[in-house]
Amino acid sequence: MSFEQPRSVYDRHVGRYSSRLASALIERAGVRGGDRVLDVGAGPGPLAEALATRLGAANVAAVEPSRTFADACRARVPGADVRIGTAEALPFENGRFDVALSQLVVNFMREPAAGAREMGRVARRTVASCVWDYAGEMWMLRHFWDGALDVDPDAPDEGRTMAHCSPDGLAALWRTAGLRDVETDELVVDALYADFDDYWSPFPQGVGPSGAYVAALDADVRERVRRAIYRRLGEPVGAFTLTARAWFVSGSPNA
Ligand SMILES: C[S@@+](CC[C@H](N)C(=O)[O-])C[C@H]1O[C@@H](n2cnc3c(N)ncnc32)[C@H](O)[C@@H]1O
């Protein structure tokens, strides 16, 4: 499974953006002092950590199906209630939280409508989420898949394979899950890379769908893909920055 990875590997892949994205998500979702908040699909805990900094760990709970990531989250946010589980069957009673959040998770859920409905069951005020703009301006992954497609037209571009990664798609999902007053927005963050190797080196380690794709390639195809992505990035020499857009959605549970 592509999310049974050490935190150190994840943090150099999409995790490089996670802490900044967490701050933007918390702000846009209207989390305020005294709230109790659930982080669904917490991964190694960047959002749970940002929530604990603002609210205190005792007001933060997290659910994550990967045991490796759940352990990393527990170590990162001591005092938070971190449980193994999935969005589709949250192990909490109705209305236990003020806000339920998920960051970069909805598109990985087996049953996204059930997951969003469950988030609405356990939250009293707000259910909010964000998903990468895979088809557009999440440049780390967009350049990756465009380079892969230059070499391999059958590459499983997440811009095509991922569901619920547009504002309209997310709003429709939230309404299907029974949430009301639905709003969408964009969250834009950036990340600094020391050089191209800093960008490329997490991929062969297999994290996420892009890493799983690279890890399965023969050495010669992998090298051609690596070169194609380097060209897509504009053949950077030394440090460079990439921006990443995520689509945001929020709604209110029915009282
Ligand atoms: C891209 S990672 C995001 C992790 C973290 N939220 C972050 O912002 O860095 C996607 C996460 O969703 C988790 N996940 C996959 N299916 C899930 C489900 N059905 N319910 C909850 N989490 C799920 C994965 O194990 C993984 O940790």
Image: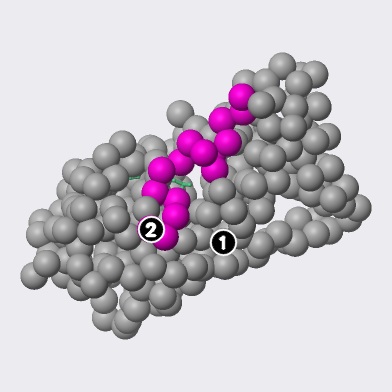
Relative to the observer, which residue lies in front, 178 or 54? 178
Viewer-nearest of labels 1 and 2? 2
| Residue, disc 2 | 168
Q: State the image coordinates of residue 38 (x, y, percent, origin top left).
A: 28, 61
Task: Name the residue at 56% across, 30% down.
Answer: 156
Task: Name the residue at 51% across, 54% down.
Answer: 132
Tag on residue 245? 1
Tell me the element at label 2. helix
Q: State the image coordinates of residue 220 (x, y, percent, origin top left).
A: 80, 19
Residue 62 among those drawn in magenta: no
Relative placement, left or right, of 215 versus 26 is: right
Task: Name the residue furthest right.
Answer: 237
Task: Name the residue at 65% across, 39% down.
Answer: 145
Residue 167 among those drawn in magenta: yes
Tag on residue 191? none
Relative placement, left or right, of 219 versus 45 is: right
Relative to the observer, which residue lies in front, 130 or 36? 130
Residue 119 shows in the view:
no
User: Distance of mark 1 from mark 2, alpha carbons?
Assistant: 15 Å
Residue type, numbered disc 1:
Arg
Residue type, numbered disc 2:
Asp
Instruction: Tell me which numbered mark, 1 or 2, is placed earlier along the sequence.
Output: 2
Task: Name the residue furthest bottom.
Answer: 33
Mark 2: give few (<14), some (14-19) or many (20+) Cα within 10 Å.
few
Q: Is residue 233 above or below residue 96?
A: above
Q: Which residues are magenta?
A: 154-168
Task: Name the residue at 41% across, 75% down.
Answer: 28
Q: Is residue 95 above or below residue 165?
A: below
Relative to the observer, which residue lies in front, 202 or 232? 232
Q: State the image coordinates of residue 11 (x, y, percent, origin top left).
A: 59, 50
Relative placement, left or right, of 151 versus 122 is: right
Mark 1: give few (<14), some (14-19) or many (20+) Cα within 10 Å.
many
